[in-house]
Image (cartoon, rainbow, N blue to C red):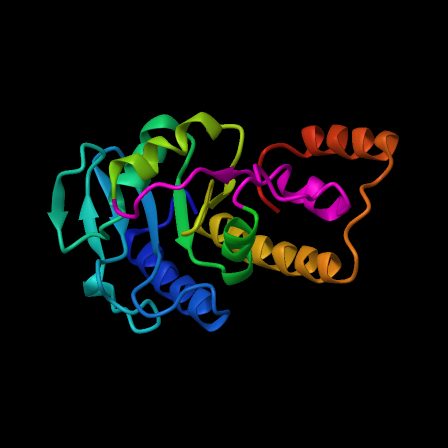
Amino acid sequence: MHNASQTEISELILELSRHLHQRHLLAAADGNLSYRFSDQEIVITPSGKNKSRLKPEDLAWMNLKGEILAGQPSSERLMHLEIYRKVPEARAIVHAHPPTAIAWSLARPDLRELPTEALPEVILAAGKIPVVPYARPGTLEMGTRILPFLPDCRLLILARHGAVCWGDSLEEAANGIERLEQVAMILKIADELGGTVPLPYGELRALKELRKQIGPRII
């Protein structure tokens, strides 16, 4: 949707906000979605409003410098800006609070990435899913903690807080969050049943080569 109008993008942000809320990936005023039209125009969900009941006029606008052009942008806009500045190809960002993914970072505080080497679809669709060290929500540190993982990783768990996915489109970023929670749930169930068994080394290598051919997009 690189040629989409501001109205079309605004409507899509509202639609995806409702979808993520219905899937229990957002609650109350949690989370935020944004889209970059250019360095001069970034649209982002507002601060302190339930994502299931947003209206187009609630959306806020700012530029890459962080100057507010209209509305009251999310308190976590600093994280969005850090990603946009670091990754010029990032067009959209979704930050949500997928419960099971967050729970992994609570129960396993030493975890550096989700143990996805038993799931071929995850390797093909997302590559590795790192856990970003904790930073206080709403601070610049939350953005700077992500920087070492960029641009290689598009989908990340934010320890004790949530998850963030960036991509070429709003659909890609939202799909990444949805996929993350499904993966986290599968791994939780497998862990309760006795643990996961990684795929053989040769198969892992083959899947990772296929991932390189697919490219970095979250699918």
Q: Position of residue 211 (x, y in %)?
A: 70, 34
Q: Position of residue 114 (x, y in %)?
A: 62, 44
- Horizontal placement of 134 versus 70: left or right? right
**Residue drawn at x 59%, y 54% as measured from the top left:** 179
**Residue drawn at x 48%, y 69% as measured from the top left:** 24
- Horizontal placement of 16 versus 116: left or right? left
Res. 146 image quadrant: top left
**Residue nearest the viewer, comparing 11 with 147:** 147
Whether 45 is drawn above or below 19: the answer is above
Can residue 136 be found in the magenta stretch?
A: yes
Can residue 132 be found in the magenta stretch?
A: yes
Q: Position of residue 113 (x, y in %)?
A: 59, 39
Please report the bounds of the magenta region as a residue range: 109-138
> Looking at the image, how many numbered discs can be counted on the residues?
0
Q: Position of residue 51 (x, y in %)?
A: 33, 67
Res. 3 image quadrant: top left
**Residue nearest the viewer, comparing 56 with 173:** 173
Whether 192 is drawn above or below 95: the answer is below
Note whether residue 196 is visible.
yes
